[in-house]
């Protein structure tokens, strides 16, 4: 492995036999290990327990159906006695931590028949309590049978209670990845679904909603985890069908706390040598899911049982080739191919593990930051540390693009002033000086002479800038370094002693949402130094962009923090485990093709461009002194001098597939320079345009504006987002609000709205 390569992600693979009727023994656990599995699933109780419980339920049902029974309600529900050693051989031994315990699949927590639900709950609680007592870490609970939404709440309530029974237990709900629109009764005749009385079942059918397609399974999960208040010990596992659901649904599961994925034997297909393999789409999905910060486990279901304690030779070829080894080839020539080999599926998964594609350099850089919430920097108020500048300076794109933009601007101006003098270039907010270096390189590359200035208000960075000027051969003592707030800078002092003008003003004061580090306010304040006829700002303009997001992980993170302020400020975050709610490449009502990569609808909220019109600046100056015509102050305080930098935007997003909005993802785009030739140099963090404009740029992560109360949106719903940039001349803050609408017969109905959130208390000081 080359030094720059990363080791492949290890796949934790478990063996799951869905027909197992008794807890696994220690020797079965060893057998699974010897076969190359990392874990094995086990029921908590056995078939004898099921018979016992079933006979109790049957006795109750006989009693209430008896002709002599006049009042059904006078017959008490059955009480399920405690587990006994006859009902479970699970014990707190050494192998317990490698078990993934399953609660009984035959109970029906969501049954409309109250007696069935009552008995099921008792079984469930006993199993959970016993598993927790034995020291099991992870319990899988088979998902609810679909009986309509009333019963689903019963199921969710039971899970919520189970989380309180075992204080250390991790609970995973097992659901199909995509629910068939009409789920038939369970094939197992012993399932308690079949015990429910006809009368209740008819009732439930009446209440059930029309089938809601692919997302039914996700709907159930969403309700369960909402009832459980996004509990940190609750996660989900999905069973993958051979034919994958649309990419949009795969993405939805990606955004959820996905603890495992189950591949039943039926999801495999034989390759041309008869060995089980997964479709290309499934392989790609595994690669994607394995990039999650906590990669899900893989459970191989019903792919052959492992021998008790007997070592099974793993002939997995390190080259990753699926071709049989010479020994296998010789064997297969003499006997029919053994496609029931209990480890062929496992060997295939190990092959996938070994052949996972390498992550890009940018992806590897991002790993440590994924979904980690940071407060936005305030470089105007705070003085950054050297290490922070050092992180910016690692960007392989930003500085290169600035150099290109400066080179184009130099060439344009050189032509305009007919090469009569050096071009005056000032880097305002120079930090440790990387943009100054780029200006000097652009000058050397184009042959256009420059007079370079570096303006910085951070006194510590100022020391470094001066040192660069003395020691860096490219700078060669040619740069004039000024320590001041750019808004107070007079401008470049000419050899004559007069104050001159700047031809090109280079700055990098952008935040994740374009203007959230107060670039507009700083650049307005320094515009007086810019040449009034031909002065160029780099960047020339920048725009802020938004899209609604489902980010359960971030919502959960914020929910468990303290202080109400946590919902009142945006966070900078390397978004990873999230889903876009509004897609640009899906028409309403379409689930989308399984292989279509979802493209989000990311809309522009507003724009700032520089230099600002002199009339606006002049009016701002008058307002500052209170002498503008009409005279009065600003809309939200102050004298209104900065009001031209306030913004409001209302955007409408179409939501194709129902979901829950936890916040708004914010991005920016910027035109650094558009040359006279029409050539543009642009930066972008907008996921739709980033690859085209500035692929691999790492200086900025997205920003998220959170919602305290997640907002549900129906299929083909609409979300209207209102976003404000507010200012009172002393500070700048954002306000945001989301409304959900649905159209029925052409009319638009408001279904809900978030609170108006405001970062006023955490505003950026001007
Ligand atoms: C995001 S850093 C960029 C640093 C450097 N130009 C780079 O690209 O690596 C912004 C810099 O602008 C400085 N800055 C912010 N507002 C300023 C102001 N009003 N006057 C002078 N410097 C300012 C900060 O101290 C900081 O060094």
Image (spheres, rainbow, N blue to C red):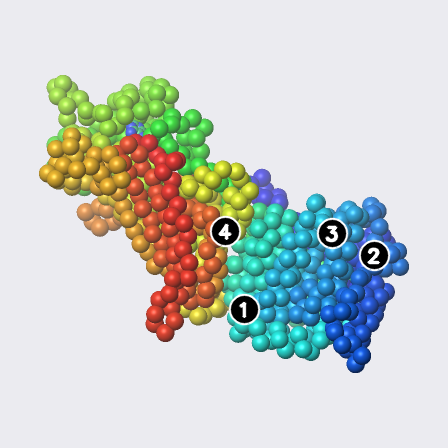
Q: Which mark is residue 214?
A: 1
Q: Are marks 2 and 4 in contact (CB under 8 Å)?
A: no
* Cα–Cα gap, marks 3 and 1: 32 Å
Q: In this figure, which residue is indicated by the disc labeled 4?
A: 551
Q: Which mark is residue 486?
A: none
Q: Secondary structure at mark 3?
A: loop
Tell me which label, 1 or 2, sits earlier in the chain.
2
Disc 3 versus disc 4: nearer the observer:
4
Q: In this figure, which residue is indicated by the disc labeled 3?
A: 38
- Residue 243 falls left or right of residue 563: right
Taking the view exactly as shown, the residue that stands out farthest to the left is 629
User: Which residue is located at x 36 percent, y 57 percent?
Assistant: 720
Query: Number of marks in the image?
Result: 4
Q: Looking at the picture, does residue 668 appear above or below residue 83? A: above
Taking the view exactly as shown, the residue that stands out farthest to the bottom is 67
Q: Secondary structure at mark 1?
A: helix
Q: Is residue 239 visible?
A: no
* Cα–Cα gap, marks 4 and 1: 20 Å
User: Which residue is located at x 69 percent, y 59 percent?
Assistant: 141
Q: Which mark is residue 82?
A: 2
Q: Are marks 3 and 2 in contact (CB under 8 Å)?
A: no
Answer few, some or many: residues within 10 Å of disc 3's Cα (few below 14, many 20 plus, some between 14 and 19). Answer: some
């Amino acid at each position: 492995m080359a030094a720059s390569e990363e080791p492949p992600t290890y796949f934790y693979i478990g063996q799951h036999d869905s027909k197992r009727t008794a807890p696994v023994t220690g020797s079965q656990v060893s057998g699974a290990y010897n076969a190359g599995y990392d874990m094995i699933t086990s029921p908590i109780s056995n078939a004898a327990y099921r018979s016992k419980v079933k006979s109790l339920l049957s006795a109750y049902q006989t009693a209430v159906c008896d002709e002599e029974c006049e009042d059904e309600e006078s017959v008490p529900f059955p009480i399920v006695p405690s587990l006994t050693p006859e009902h479970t051989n699970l014990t707190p031994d050494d192998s317990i931590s490698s078990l993934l315990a399953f609660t009984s699949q035959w109970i029906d927590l969501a049954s409309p028949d109250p007696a069935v639900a009552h008995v099921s709950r008792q079984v469930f609680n006993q199993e959970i309590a016993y598993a927790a007592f034995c020291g099991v870490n992870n319990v899988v609970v088979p998902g609810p049978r679909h009986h309509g939404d009333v019963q689903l709440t019963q199921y969710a309530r039971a899970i919520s209670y189970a989380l309180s029974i075992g204080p250390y237990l991790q609970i995973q709900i097992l659901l199909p990845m995509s629910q068939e629109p009409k789920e038939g009764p369970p094939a197992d005749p012993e399932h308690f679904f079949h015990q429910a009385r006809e009368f209740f079942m008819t009732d439930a059918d009446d209440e059930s909603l029309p089938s809601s397609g692919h997302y039914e399974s996700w709907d159930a999960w969403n309700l369960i985890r909402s009832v459980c208040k996004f509990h940190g010990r609750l996660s989900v596992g999905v069973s993958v069908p051979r034919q994958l659901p649309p990419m949009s649904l795969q993405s939805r599961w990606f955004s959820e706390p996905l603890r495992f994925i189950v591949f039943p034997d039926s999801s495999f297909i034989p390759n041309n040598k008869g060995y089980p393999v997964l479709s290309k789409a499934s392989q790609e999905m595994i690669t994607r899911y394995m990039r999650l910060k906590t990669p899900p486990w893989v459970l191989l279901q019903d792919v052959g049982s492992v021998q008790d304690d007997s070592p099974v030779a793993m002939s997995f070829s390190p080259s990753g080739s699926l071709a049989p080894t010479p020994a296998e080839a010789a064997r297969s020539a003499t006997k029919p191919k053994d496609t029931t080999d209990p480890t062929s599926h496992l060997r295939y998964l190990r092959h996938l593990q070994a052949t996972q594609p390498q992550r890009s350099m940018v992806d590897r850089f991002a790993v440590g930051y994924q979904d980690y919430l940071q407060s936005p920097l305030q470089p105007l108020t705070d003085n950054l540390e050297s290490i922070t500048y050092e992180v910016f300076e690692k960007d392989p794109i930003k500085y290169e693009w600035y150099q290109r933009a400066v080179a184009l601007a130099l060439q344009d101006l050189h032509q305009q002033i007919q090469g009569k003098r050096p071009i005056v270039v000032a880097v305002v907010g120079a930090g440790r000086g990387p943009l100054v270096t780029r200006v000097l390189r652009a000058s050397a590359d184009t042959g256009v002479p420059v007079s370079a200035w570096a303006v910085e208000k951070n006194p510590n960075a100022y020391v470094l800038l001066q040192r660069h000027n003395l020691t860096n051969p490219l700078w060669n003592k040619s740069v004039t370094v000024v320590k001041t707030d750019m808004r107070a800078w007079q401008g470049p002092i000419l050899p004559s002693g007069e104050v001159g003008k700047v031809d090109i003003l280079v700055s990098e004061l952008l935040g994740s949402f374009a203007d959230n580090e107060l670039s507009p306010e700083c650049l307005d304040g320094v515009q007086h130094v810019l040449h009034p006829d031909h002065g160029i700002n780099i960047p020339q303009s920048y725009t802020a962009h938004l899209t609604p997001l489902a980010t359960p992980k971030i919502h959960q993170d914020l929910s468990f923090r303290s202080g109400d302020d946590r919902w009142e400020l945006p966070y900078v975050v390397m978004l990873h485990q999230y889903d876009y709610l509004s897609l640009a490449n899906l028409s309403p009502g379409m689930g989308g093709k399984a292989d279509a990569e979802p493209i989000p609808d990311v809309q522009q909220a507003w724009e700032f461009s520089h230099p600002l019109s002199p009339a606006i600046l002049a009016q701002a100056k008058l307002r500052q002194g209170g002498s503008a015509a009409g005279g009065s102050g600003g809309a939200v305080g102050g004298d209104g001098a900065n009001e031209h930098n306030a913004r409001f935007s209302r955007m409408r997003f179409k939501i194709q597939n129902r979901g829950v909005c936890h916040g708004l993802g914010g991005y920016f785009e910027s035109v650094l320079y558009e040359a006279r030739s029409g050539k543009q140099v642009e930066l972008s963090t907008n996921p739709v345009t980033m690859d085209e404009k500035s692929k691999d740029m790492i200086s900025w992560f997205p920003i998220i504006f959170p919602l305290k109360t997640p907002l549900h949106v129906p299929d083909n719903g609409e979300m209207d987002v209102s976003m404000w940039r507010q200012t009172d001349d002393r500070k700048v803050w954002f306000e945001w609000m989301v409304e959900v609408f649905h159209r029925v017969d052409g009319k638009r109905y408001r279904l809900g709205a978030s609170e108006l959130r405001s970062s006023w208390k955490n505003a950026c000081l001007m």
